[in-house]
Image: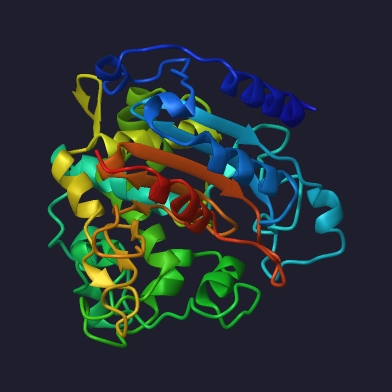
Amino acid sequence: VTRWLAALRGISAACYVTMASASFAETFVPGDQWLYADPASVGIDPAPLQALDAEIRAGEHGNIDSMTIIRHGQMVFDRRYQWDYDAQHAGLVYPSPPPWDYFNPQAYPFHGETDLHSLQSVSKSVMSALIGIAIARGELPGTDATLGDLLPHREFADPAVKAVTLENVLKMTAGIDWEEEVSYFSQENDATAVESTNDWVGYLLKKRLSVEQGTLFDYNSASSQALSEILTTATGVPTNAYAEQHLFGPIGITDYFWNTAPEGFTNAGGGLFLNAHDLARFALLFLREGSWGEEQVVPSEWVRRSATSWIPVDANDPDGWGYGYQWWIYRHQTESSPKMYGGWGWGGQFPLIVPELDLVAVFTGWNIKEDADYTYAFDLFYDRVVTSIARP
């Protein structure tokens, strides 16, 4: 019932229009309320949005739980969609033990009866922002520091892993032997196997270097978990509490849930839950290069480095996907097309940022079944909305 009421509030709020000058709206930061505007008033054709909304409601693109679009600081579209996850996941068993049982509708995708939605690997992008903040505050050394420097209490099976730099952990180029390309329903996937252990970072540090660090993109969720342990080791503050003080608080996020890995550190690989509007705050912060009103929350240079493609995701396709500091640099139709970067969480969590168009979108979803039939929301957004907006 709580979730149903929250959905109604989201739909009714989207119908409320607040007129604001462009100059004010483009610097406005939301408090308890957002500015709302008609899509056409900010240069967005409403027809593709209405068509996409109808298709999502009809289930044509799988389980998309929300779609929120913001341009020039104003929310122009905001919808919630309802799916019967009890029925969809009845009798299905995920290979990891509780609490990592992602088919449990009491725990996923919403946290209990709240509107807090699992972000999965978008947690990594939030974790990266916290690392940037800590470096700027002088609480962490620069990105050339090594795992051995940053985790002095840990044992390493391979001295070469001890020499892996923070820079390469952030870029997913650590070179540590890790398999996360096979199905998450297989114990051959290290990210699934590690969930059955009582020490995720310890599992990682038993691995050896398989390629020279910095040379190959290799997605590794446990290395993102190491970032949480690195931050707490340096500051003495749990990652979630550090986020409250230096990231969530300054941008107005007061309600969240962030679970903990078995070794006792905040789960940076995939444990954060936010509602769609607060995820949009985080995306808007990055659109505005880390500033929120008069406060520089995340260093602007860190935002730029996060949104830079340091390495191709596919070595055979250097012009395709790229990866920044725990952010994805999305593929584009042509070199001249507007560039888009964002987070990517398993199941369909996408904060999407198009700086050239002053445009942000947030999607949440829960397409996790192996045989799920769905369309990636980032493709829907780019093909339907981004390409329909003329460059300024």
Residue lying at the far bottom in this picture: please name it: 210
175 shown above or below 253? below
- Which residue is at a point 40% across and 53% down the rendered structure image? 124
Q: Is residue 218 left or right of residue 366?
A: left
Image coordinates of residue 290 in percent, x first then y, are 24, 35
376 shown above or below 22? below
Whether residue 159 appears in this view of the structure is yes
User: Image quarter for residue 195?
Assistant: bottom right
Q: Please, which colouring scheme is shown?
A: rainbow
Q: How many marks?
A: 0
320 shown above or below 356? below
Image coordinates of residue 8 in percent, x first then y, are 71, 24
User: Image quarter for residue 284?
Assistant: top left
- Which residue is at a point 12% across and 62% down the rendered structure image? 144
- Front residue of 102/327: it is 327
- Front residue of 86/152: it is 86
Whether residue 126 appears in this view of the structure is no
Rendered-image quadrant of the N terminus = top right
Image coordinates of residue 207 in percent, x first then y, are 38, 81
- Front residue of 363/58: it is 58
133 shown above or below 326? above
- Which residue is at a point 82% across and 57% down the rendered structure image? 88
Rendered-image quadrant of the C terminus = top left
- Which residue is at a point 20% across and 63% down the rendered structure image? 167
